[in-house]
Structures are given as structure tokens and as C-alpha cells.
Image (tube, rainbow, N blue to C red):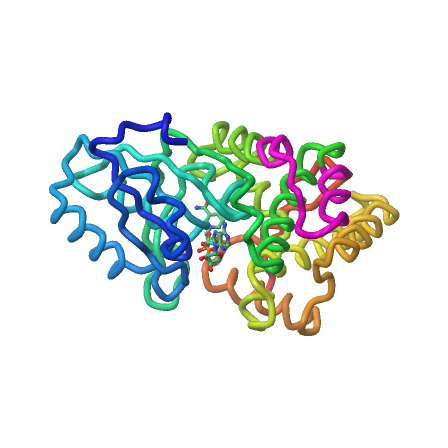
């Protein structure tokens, strides 16, 4: 990894979970630490980082590297985008979710008030370095959340990778995730992003499971985001069957696969409550309801419904 960047003029912004192990010390760069929690993913943290960058006399030639999960990579991208009108940066995602999702695609940002990712920019990292060794220390629940996003990506575009990933997650723990599968998921996301960098079209396919998933997160605190997405995907598959877009056996298979890898598949509140939450959101913004519905394992489509009173 050290070959990827110049030693002088590089500053790491790293997840404090690596502080004690000294694992990043060998890189020989100054390190600014961040605590990976949604409460710390704020403008105040970015302000603190900016102060620390100024203290270290960071200038427009400084190269930033974010090392950590999605919280750290989002904060790093945003800080890099605004400090002195923009610094070059790279990312070393250390959770599965960040390796296949958060670190790919150039979206960054922080939370504001009670709104997630309310403030941010689009700015691409110069490199995303994926090292699956980091996943060995990941708590099982974090791994499952990443698994949900990875399986989601394969459901959109690669049936064979989907099957392989399911087998890996069903296998012995801790999971030995083949690097090629992580790369494949990252590549699929990257290619959708490349076709639609600002999220007005095909990139929205990546929201498979998210319409129901967000409603689940709104109605209950029982599940982490990835888990809510897993339930959302199962609900989207069922909806696809109702619309005649997917064969019921395939929807059942997705559900069984998710159960077999330890992902939740049942919503924590009645479905009517979720539908009401989705409708309420859309009525407020006056827009149409957007779903991503799987058609087969390896293919999905956007589906819009107008909101009726
Ligand atoms: N920018 C995007 O396109 C995008 C996409 C998806 C998610 N996100 C954002 O990503 C964030 C979630 O990311 P996340 O799930 O990676 O969460 P995270 O960054 O909070 O990391 C999860 C936990 O794992 C710890 N951790 C990180 N790497 C570890 C390792 N190798 N071993 C052991 N522990 C480790 C962290 O300290 C933290 O406690 C959310 O804030 C979300 O908004 C952004």
C-alpha cells in the first residue's frame, strides 16, 4: 500500500479503531484520528480535521488518505473536497460495506441535525485500495451488513458472483472473502456510477432494497442499515412477483439465501406501517414512488408509481 502515495505531503485520516494496534504507524505519515460513529460524522468533526490540517500546514499539494469504514471514507472525501478548495485523496476502506459500496463512486458527506448525509459533495478518490485482510477483525454484524450490500450489487448484475458470494458467507467463520469477489462488486458499482455520476438514472439501481430499507430504519431502530436493506430486497422481490416481473421461485430463493447467511428477512413492523412511511415521505416531496425491482438474479429494473392521495 505504501507504494501508492508519496511519503512526504501525505496525511492519513484514520478510524480510531486502528490506533492501539499501531497497524498504520509503519506507513510513516501523520495520522488524524476519527471516531467511527454517526454522531461524530458531523461538520464539527470536519472543522476539527481542518484545524489539524492547518496546524500541519497542509497545502494544495497535500495528499489525504482515508483509512476506515464508510464513516471515515465519507468524512475524508468531504474534507478533501473542501479544504483549500480541494485536495487529492485516496481511500483504504476497511469494512466490507466500505469496500463494495461507500468508498466507491465519489459521494461523500456528513450528517446534519438529524438528517443523514445531508451535507456533502461528489468527488472521486484517486485510488481505492482494497485489502481483504482488514475484514478478519470485522465484527460479524458489520460483516453481515457488508454482505447485504454485496449481494445486492450482484443481484443487479452478476448471477454467478451472487451464487459464489452466498457460498462464501455460508462457509466457515471468520469468512475468508476472496478479493476477486470484492473487486467484482466494486467494479459493478463503479460502472453504474461512471454511466451516471450524479445519480439521476442507472445509478439508482443501487437503491435495490433501499425504499423499504429506509422505511424500516424510520419505523424501528432494531436493524442496522445493511440489515434493513436485506429485508428491503426480500420485500422488493416479493413486490416484483406481484407485478409479474419475477418468478416466485426466484424470490423464494433469494429469501432462503439471505436466511442461510444470517441476514434478517422479516420487517420488524407491519408492512402497512412501512408503506405508510414511504407514502408520507413522498407526499411531502410531491414526487413519485421509486422502487428497484429484481427481475431475475442478476438483473433489476427501476419501477415508478405515482402517489395517490
Ligand atoms: N458514500 C457512499 O456512497 C456511501 C454508501 C454507503 C454507505 N455510506 C456511509 O457509510 C457509513 C457506514 O459505513 P460502515 O458500515 O463501514 O461503518 P463504519 O465506518 O461505522 O464502520 C463500522 C464499525 O467497524 C469498525 N471498523 C472499521 N474497520 C474495521 C476493521 N477492519 N476491523 C474491525 N472493526 C472495524 C469501525 O470503527 C466501526 O465501529 C454510513 O455513514 C453511510 O452513510 C456511504
User: Is residue 307 among the parts visible in the rendering?
Assistant: yes
Quadrant for the N terminus in the image: top left
- 212 over 170 or under it: above or below: below
Main SS category, magenta section: helix
* Magenta-drawn segment: 162-184
Q: Nearer the viewer, residue 8 or 298?
A: 8
* Residue located at (45% from left, 37% from top): 105
* Residue located at (21% from left, 31% from top): 8
Where residue 94 appears, x then y in whole percent? 48, 46
User: Is residue 212 among the parts visible in the rendering?
Assistant: no
Q: Nearer the viewer, residue 196 or 109?
A: 109
- 8 over 97 or under it: above or below: above
Residue 183 within the segment the image draws in magenta: yes
Q: Quadrant of residue 11?
A: top left
Where residue 239 appears, x then y in whole percent? 75, 54
Q: Quadrant of residue 107?
A: top left
- 28 over 231 or under it: above or below: above
Q: Tell me how many marks there are.
A: 0
Q: Quadrant of residue 151?
A: top right
59 relative position to 272: left or right: left
Quadrant for the C terminus in the image: bottom right
Q: Nearer the viewer, residue 98 or 279?
A: 98
Q: Nearer the viewer, residue 306 or 256?
A: 256
Residue 254 within the segment the image draws in magenta: no
Q: Residue furthest right?
A: 249
Where residue 43 appears, x then y in whole percent? 26, 58
Where residue 12 appears, x then y in whole percent? 30, 43
263 relative position to 14: left or right: right
Amino acid at each position: 500500500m505504501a507504494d501508492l502515495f508519496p511519503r512526504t505531503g501525505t496525511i492519513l485520516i484514520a478510524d480510531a479503531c486502528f490506533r492501539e494496534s499501531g497497524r498504520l504507524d509503519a506507513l510513516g505519515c501523520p495520522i488524524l484520528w476519527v471516531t467511527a460513529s454517526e454522531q461524530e460524522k458531523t461538520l464539527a468533526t470536519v472543522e476539527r480535521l481542518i484545524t489539524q490540517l492547518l496546524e500541519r500546514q497542509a497545502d494544495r499539494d497535500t495528499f489525504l488518505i482515508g483509512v476506515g469504514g464508510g464513516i471515515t471514507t465519507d468524512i475524508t472525501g468531504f474534507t478533501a473536497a473542501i479544504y483549500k478548495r480541494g485536495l487529492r485523496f485516496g481511500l483504504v476502506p476497511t469494512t466490507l460495506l466500505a469496500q463494495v459500496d461507500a468508498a466507491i463512486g465519489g459521494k461523500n458527506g456528513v450528517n446534519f441535525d438529524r438528517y443523514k448525509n445531508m451535507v456533502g459533495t461528489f468527488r472521486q478518490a484517486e485510488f481505492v485500495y482494497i485489502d481483504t485482510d482488514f475484514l478478519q477483525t470485522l465484527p460479524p454484524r458489520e460483516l453481515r451488513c457488508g454482505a447485504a450490500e454485496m449481494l445486492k450489487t450482484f443481484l443487479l448484475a452478476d448471477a454467478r458472483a451472487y451464487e459464489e458470494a452466498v457460498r462464501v458467507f455460508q462457509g466457515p467463520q471468520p469468512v475468508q472473502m476472496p478479493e476477486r469477489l470484492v473487486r467484482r462488486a466494486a467494479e459493478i458499482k463503479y460502472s453504474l456510477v461512471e454511466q451516471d455520476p450524479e445519480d439521476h438514472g442507472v445509478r439508482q439501481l443501487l437503491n435495490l432494497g433501499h425504499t423499504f430499507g429506509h422505511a424500516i430504519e424510520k419505523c424501528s431502530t432494531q436493524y442496522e442499515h445493511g440489515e434493513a436493506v436485506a429485508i428491503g430486497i426480500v420485500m422488493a422481490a416479493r413486490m416484483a412477483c406481484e407485478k409479474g416481473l419475477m418468478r416466485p421461485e426466484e424470490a423464494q430463493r433469494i429469501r432462503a439465501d439471505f436466511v442461510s447467511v444470517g441476514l434478517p428477512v422479516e420487517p420488524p413492523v407491519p408492512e402497512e406501517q412501512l408503506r405508510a412511511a414511504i407514502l408520507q415521505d413522498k407526499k411531502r416531496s410531491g414526487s413519485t414512488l421509486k422502487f428497484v425491482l429484481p427481475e431475475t438474479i442478476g438483473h433489476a429494473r427501476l419501477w415508478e408509481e405515482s402517489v395517490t392521495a
